[in-house]
């Protein structure tokens, strides 16, 4: 946006343009209804599959498009300008697939990533439980080895794409004594006996997305569906978050950009005291602050993506930084956008009230913004340990 | 099944402005798009291909930049594209254009169906589709909103002013397609990337070997004597006041005019 050269490649720009057209033509006309009625955007995901976008992040050898992190993040950002309820339903597929991409065997990748790449199947990530939120190591779902199978018992909570997805990466305790090193990750398919879905949540925002419980009752999963080795689960989850958090940051950047676009357009046409409200310095400066926040959030988000693409080893800090910074920016910019709209902003006829409700989740999911600050702080402690 | 879709590149009418002094369209810098009705013809072809297999070839006659419209069609799913372009074809009216396009289609083998949009949004003549069918001497139906393949014929649903008609039409056939038929699918990323690099053959005078008297401006029987914007003679009245009062006043006026 604007006149900043972000070094976007021609291919990345094609992705942006394609999704931008899609957002305007297919998401904007339906987003208010999806939000109001809490309708999962299945038709949109199916169309994204026809457009080769469900496999955007999956390597070509498994049938995907093979975009880099930057390209995929730009896709999420662009879609998020129009609705993050839709963009999270899209991006949660990648979150569900990331453990397989990061730690899966070639057979697992072939078997499970190919149908995700074509969009024939959808994915979800199952870590959170009622007593294991920020304290992800405290999960209680268990997996007990029985012959060539593992038997899963427990309940996962608030799982995005729960019930809609076909392939789930689920974290369960295989050795309680080892704490977080006793957690393993399993690929569980939807129709597995003993695997069912609990209630669908009614939410403040991102209401188009589906958030449900995953219930495992003596659910037998083939041992070959374990990703990596026993005990690698927690590490895999953390590595997944390193990759996925810039995607959440991109949701924040896109959402904030969408709110800014609406606010500036409105401030130019809304007249009070005989002049457009943008002619008031108080409001103009507000818009300037909003724009600066969007661009700085974009900068740190792209920096994280470029670090990932460059293969930088430990990116937890920048990944956490962009997640919390862009999430906080989205909350602040959408709140200000409602303010620019005044009373109209509070009404459902205009898109900014939804944007403000949607923004809140960005400070909570994929690790609260307080946990992100912990990660950044702890990285500092390590970095300065020898100084 | 081999389907040919004829498309035209037109100025994006949503983005065209009018020169206030001359009342002419400001054409410079206006982005070009595929004629919107041709998008419906393309989607009809793609749906037939999805169902029955085969190949969709898009043809556009126009200046070299019409190649961009063909690349867009490829990104939406067309298999091949052919540009019909030559300085000698310039200035062609609908008759000469129909003739020239028919020569290009004759070069293709085993064409089962030729689709056109119902008309182009710039000229609005709706003549090139029927014109091409005439030169190819094949049956043609206009205003199609649906088509099914039934053995050696097509069953076509044709929109009429008061409903629709179902026709059987022999292969090969030509149809013009209405907006109600469908909505063009979004482009695919892989096809979009491939379309950027696709080799699009350009067929000109040498490839089509036309009769000289039938092409270009000199081969066009239509002579444009004058172009002008019709004077606007509308009684215009702007209401003001509270919205509820304005609505009441508007309803009253519409009733007076027997519109309501």
Image (cartoon, helix red, strand yellow):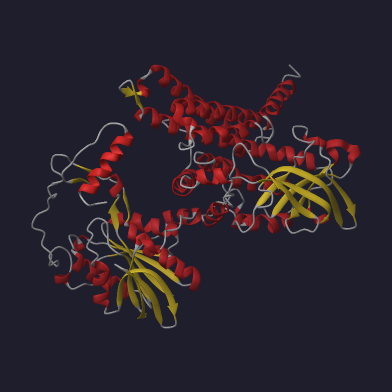
Q: Which residue occupies 41% across, 29% down?
A: A264
Count of residue discs: 0
Nearer-the-camera pick, A139 or A379? A139
Residue A74 in sight from this viewpoint: yes
Image spot of residue B66 (x, y percent):
30, 56
Image spot of residue A59 (x, y percent):
62, 51
Nearer-the-camera pick, A170 or A154? A154
Q: Quadrant of residue B19?
A: top left
Q: Is residue B35 left or right of residue A348?
A: left
Image spot of residue B47 (x, y percent):
46, 67
Q: Is residue A149 left or right of residue A73?
A: right
Q: Which residue occupies 36% across, 69% down?
A: B4
Q: Quadrant of the N terminus of chain A?
A: top left
Q: Is residue B203 left or right of residue B188?
A: left
Nearer-the-camera pick, A143 or A376? A143
> Vertical placement of A335 versus A210: above or below?
above
> Vertical placement of B205 versus A331: above or below?
below
Q: Is residue B243 left or right of residue A352?
A: left
Q: Quadrant of residue B198?
A: bottom left
Image spot of residue A329 (x, y percent):
55, 27
Nearer-the-camera pick, A96 or A337? A337
**Name of the residue lying farthest toward the bottom:** B152
> Vertical placement of A180 versus B174: above or below?
above
Residue A310 in sight from this viewpoint: no
Q: Quadrant of the C terminus of chain A?
A: top right
């Amino acid at each position: 946006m604007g006149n900043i050269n972000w070094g976007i490649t021609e291919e990345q720009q094609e992705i942006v343009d394609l999704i931008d057209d899609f957002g305007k033509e297919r998401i904007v006309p339906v987003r208010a209804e999806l939000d109001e009625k809490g309708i999962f955007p299945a038709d949109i995901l199916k169309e994204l599959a026809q457009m080769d976008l469900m496999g955007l992040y999956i390597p070509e050898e498994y049938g995907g498009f093979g975009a880099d992190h930057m390209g995929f993040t730009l896709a999420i950002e662009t879609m998020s300008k129009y609705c993050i309820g839709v963009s999270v339903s899209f991006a949660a597929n990648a979150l569900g697939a990331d453990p397989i991409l990061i730690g899966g065997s070639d057979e697992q990748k072939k078997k499970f990533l190919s149908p995700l790449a074509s969009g024939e199947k959808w994915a979800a990530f199952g870590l959170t439980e009622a007593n294991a939120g920020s304290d992800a190591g405290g999960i209680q779902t268990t997996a007990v080895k029985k012959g060539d199978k593992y038997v899963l018992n427990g309940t996962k909570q608030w799982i995005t794409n729960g019930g809609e997805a076909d392939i789930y990466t689920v974290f369960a305790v295989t050795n309680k004594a080892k704490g977080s090193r006793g957690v393993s990750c399993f690929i569980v398919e939807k129709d597995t006996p003993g695997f069912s879905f609990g209630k669908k949540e009614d939410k403040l925002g991102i209401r188009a997305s589906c958030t449900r419980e995953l219930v495992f009752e003596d659910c037998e999963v083939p041992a070959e569906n374990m990703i990596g080795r026993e005990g690698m689960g927690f590490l895999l989850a953390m590595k997944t978050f390193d990759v996925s958090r810039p995607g959440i940051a991109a949701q924040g950047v896109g959402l904030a950009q969408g709110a800014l676009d609406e606010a500036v357009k409105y401030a130019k046409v809304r007249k009070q005291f005989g002049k457009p409200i943008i002619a008031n310095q108080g409001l103009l400066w507000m818009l300037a602050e909003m724009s600066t926040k969007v661009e700085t959030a974009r900068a740190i988000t792209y920096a994280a993506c470029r670090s990932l693409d460059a293969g930088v080893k430990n990116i937890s800090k920048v990944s956490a930084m962009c997640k919390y910074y862009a999430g906080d920016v989205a909350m602040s910019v959408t709140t200000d956008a409602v303010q620019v709209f005044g009373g109209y902003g509070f009404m459902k006829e205009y898109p900014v009230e939804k944007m403000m409700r949607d923004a809140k989740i960005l400070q909570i999911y994929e690790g609260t913004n307080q946990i992100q600050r912990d990660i950044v702080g702890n990285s500092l402690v390590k970095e300065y340990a020898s100084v | 099944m081999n389907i040919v879709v004829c498309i035209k590149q037109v100025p994006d009418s949503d983005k065209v402005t009018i020169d206030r002094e001359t009342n002419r369209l400001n054409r410079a810098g206006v982005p070009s798009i595929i004629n919107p009705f041709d998008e419906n013809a393309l989607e009809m072809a793609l749906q037939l291909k999805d169902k029955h297999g085969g190949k969709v070839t898009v043809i556009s006659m126009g200046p070299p930049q019409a190649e961009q419209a063909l690349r867009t069609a490829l990104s939406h799913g067309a298999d091949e594209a052919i540009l019909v372009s030559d300085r000698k074809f310039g200035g062609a009216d609908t008759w000469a254009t129909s003739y020239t396009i028919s020569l290009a289609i004759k070069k293709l083998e085993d064409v089962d169906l030729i689709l056109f949009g119902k008309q182009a949004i710039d000229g609005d003549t709706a003549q090139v589709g029927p014109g091409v069918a005439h030169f190819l001497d094949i049956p043609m139906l206009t205003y199609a909103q649906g088509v099914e393949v039934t053995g050696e014929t097509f069953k076509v649903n044709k929109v009429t002013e008061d409903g629709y008609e179902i026709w059987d039409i022999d292969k090969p056939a030509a149809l013009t397609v209405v907006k109600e038929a469908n909505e063009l699918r979004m482009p695919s990323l892989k096809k979009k990337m491939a379309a950027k690099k696709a080799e699009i053959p350009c067929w000109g005078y040498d490839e089509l070997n036309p009769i000289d008297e039938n092409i270009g401006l000199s081969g066009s029987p239509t002579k444009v004597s004058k172009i002008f914007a019709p004077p606007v003679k509308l009684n215009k009245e702007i209401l003001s006041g509270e919205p509820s009062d304005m609505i009441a006043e508007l309803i009253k006026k519409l009733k007076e005019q027997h519109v309501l």
